[in-house]
Amino acid sequence: MSNACPFCVAYKEIFAYSLSSLRMYNKMWHQTQEALNSLLDNESENVIESQRNQVFIFQMLATFYIKYVQIFRNLENVYDQIVHPQKRLLIRKILDGVMGRILELKNEMVELELTEFHYFDDILQDLKLAPQQLDIPIPKYFLKEKLEVIKGREKILAQILADSGLDMAEKKYSLKNIPLEEAIKLIQVAERARQGRLRAMFMKQIFLQEYRAKQAKIFSEKVVDLEVAALQIQKVWRGFHQCKKTEKQREDEMIFLGMNPPPLFNQVSATVIQAEKVTSLRNEVQVKHEKKYREALVKIKDDLKLVEGPDIKDNLQDQIRHWFIECRNLTGTFPDYPKVEEGGSAIIFSNKTPQQVTEDIIASQEEEGKNKKNKKKKAKKAKKPKQDKEKKGTREKSKEEDEGWKMSPSVFLPTMEEGNNVYKDMWKNKDESWNFPQNYDPELIKQEKRKELESEIRIQVDELMRQELKNLKLAVNREKEQPLKAGKKKDKKKKKGNKGKKGKKDKDLTADRTIESLYKELVEEGLLIRALNVNLSDYIGEYSYLGTTLRQVSIEPMPSLLDVRQLIALYGILPLGSAAVHESAPLVKSLLLAGPSGVGKKMLVHAICTETGANLFNLSATNIAGKYPGKSGLQMMLHVVFKVARQLQPSVVWIGDTEKTFYKKVPSTERMMEPKRLKKQLPKILRLLKPNDRILIVGTTQRPFDAELQSFCKVYQKIILVPRPDYASRFVLWKQIIQRNGGVITNALNVSCLAKVTDGFTQGHIVQVVKGVLTDRRIHRQNYKPLTAAEFIAALASMNPVYQEEEESFKDWYSKTPMGKKRTLALTGGIAEKEKGKGEKKEKKGKKEKKKK
């Protein structure tokens, strides 16, 4: 063992660990699929039933939502870690379906409760889940699958910025030229200061020497009793030792109770380091297996084409010929061959024998005859009067009201069910003992490629059999083809008719230019900017644990920071990251983040771009001022921006201080800037955006009350209020921001006191204060002088907090938006209905009493 290579031993350990974790992720996948299967069964049962009780409906939707989030978390983890390429394809399909279903359920809850924020405290308690398990994970494949593209784009962007001199980070500022006299004075001041420091150090040493000499003389004159001295030393030492012992016992007790973390809690353990190595190794294996799988797809298809291709062709021809003869014997004529647009012979022979096909033809002919007779009977009947139609309409409406609420049909449920069925048929009970390294399965590839090969050969066979059918008709039935001239005339008429029906297409104003040149132009103009490297997890906050309780007392709570983070993940990141989700999920084209300054609105915009690898376009009023002047210039600017955004999607179009674009009255100081240039253009742009365009328009504002509400709400589909942090969020913020900036939290620093004192201050204030206090010098002095709350509070004294009145003004503004109005009407409507009911009962009682009298 002593001669063994240490690298080989370490590699073996990692390999063994990776194999055990591989089994674990396979097991996790099977468990997740079972949970998904039971959830799909429950959902199919509940979709059929109609409900009226709003509380029951919300609890049902919320339960589905929470369970789908748990499945999403597990599937995302499994997809990231499993190395089998064919399993990954199936998991990816189901994962996209689960993501889309989560968005659909979120949309259902918003329409039901008429608010963007929901609270699940009671449901989480019933399901025995922590609030942290509701956090929406960001799939890693959003960035992993296009990492090379993103890196290449960043290099190009950095090169353009460096060439044009716009990269402020890389700019070297040259010193200003100073006159000779001023330079001499500066040198003299610095030299005198240095000499003064040296003189002060020298005088201090002399003073200390003299002091020590005096003390030595005093102690030499005194007669010291050794027993008393020993007692004094013992007393001090025992007191010090007991203090330390008591402190250690108190710390152990707090750790035992769970009030304090263990001593090595913040240190990275060896198992975590090993897990990271295994993850990187597994990523390499994933890439290798994927490459082998792609090569096998081509190779196996070519082999099948050589070996099985001729047999498939002969079988198809025999099958179609047999169909010709059977149809001729049954109907007396040869059938019409299906057109290429309809799918050719694939429609007829889709999992059917020729006998079943002939039976279908006879049945279809009989149905056509019956339909003709029914049409003649309907034509003879007289039309009913309009009054009957109105009565029918009222009856239908009353029926709909009686039926109650029903869940809207889902686009993603069929895809999930299909994926679940494939899992049951293919992977649930599959013996994989032969495939220990989890490489591709060649038999599955053969099954898939046989179908592809058959469809390709079928196209060739269809062309041959069409000609053969024509020859048979001419030879046996003596049917003559229609003259070619008549056909040509018809074609000419069709062409003439189609000429006038050509739709108007938008002119491409930059048809002669490449995307690279347009990209460069936008970067140089400052309209395409570099997104900051900020993750959504960096937006720190805590959950609101009183949301359900407050709503039960008819008090609308302010959303917490993690509620905002969830909405950004649902409306911004998930649709932009996955094309399949964006095309079919409820479409969110625009998003507005409204809140006081310093709450992290811009950070959230940059986080969307970082998590999805999206381009960031800045169309803020201050940024586009003076650029592309005039109407034609504005049209050109928007055309270039959205052309590049579509070509290099996903893309985020950010409009900072968006209230300026929708000013009620433009201030005199900003009239030259023309802030309302985009006001009329934005609604038109939103109409042109299609589900295939992964483009999100995000506006940020700290003064939404300055804008025209009607036009403001027309442009922004979703409005999210970003509040100031509450106590729980401030407590987490202080701890994490201090630690991220090099600070050490000890018992001397009362974080709870800081969180209470800083009520009203935003995340921006806290970050600014921490960076100001934790200088390099202060970080080095922490070992002998721990941080205290007083240091941070002193720095906060010069800052203005967000007062309660400002927060209330945001609430009042939001209540005037369409969603806010619906919410207030829903809350007040229930009370009004109750009062009406009470009034009607009183009137009925009064009438009865009058009749008795």
Image: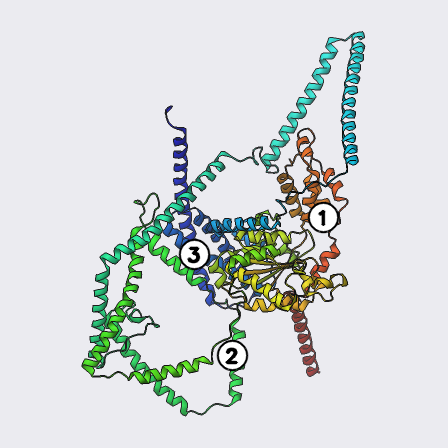
Which amino acid, mark 2?
Glu
Which amino acid, mark 1?
Asp
The reply to whether callout 3 and callout 1 are in contact (CB within 8 Å) is no
Q: Secondary structure at mark 1?
A: loop
Which amino acid, mark 3?
Ile
CA neighbours of label 2 inside 10 A, class few (<14), some (14 to 19), many (20+):
few
Colour convention: rainbow
The quadrant the N terminus occupies is top left
Q: Is residue 266 visible from the viewing direction of this image?
A: yes
What residue is rendered at 20% in x and 68% in y?
318
Give the left or right position of residue 297, taking residue 143 as reference: left
Q: Secondary structure at mark 3?
A: helix
Q: Is residue 826 visible from the viewing direction of this image?
A: no
Report x, y in % for residue 127: 52, 52
Nearest the eye: 527 or 384? 527
| N-terminal-most mark, 2 or 1 | 2
Query: Which numbered circle lies on residue 396?
Result: 2
| N-terminal-most mark, 3 or 2 | 3
Which residue was labeled with disc 3?
94
Q: Secondary structure at mark 2?
A: helix
Asked if residue 386 is positioned above or below residue 67 in the image, the reply reads below
- Asked where in the image residue 415 lies, by quadrant, the reply is bottom left
Between the residue at mark 3 and the residue at mark 2, the CA separation in whole angstroms equals: 38 Å
Query: Which numbered circle lies on residue 759?
Result: 1
Report x, y in % for residue 260: 61, 36
What residue is rendered at 80% in x and 14% in y?
210
The quadrant the C terminus occupies is bottom right
Asked if residue 233 is positioned above or below residue 87 in the image, the reply reads above
Between the residue at mark 2 and the residue at mark 1, the CA separation in whole angstroms equals: 55 Å
| Number of numbered discs overlaid on the protein picture | 3
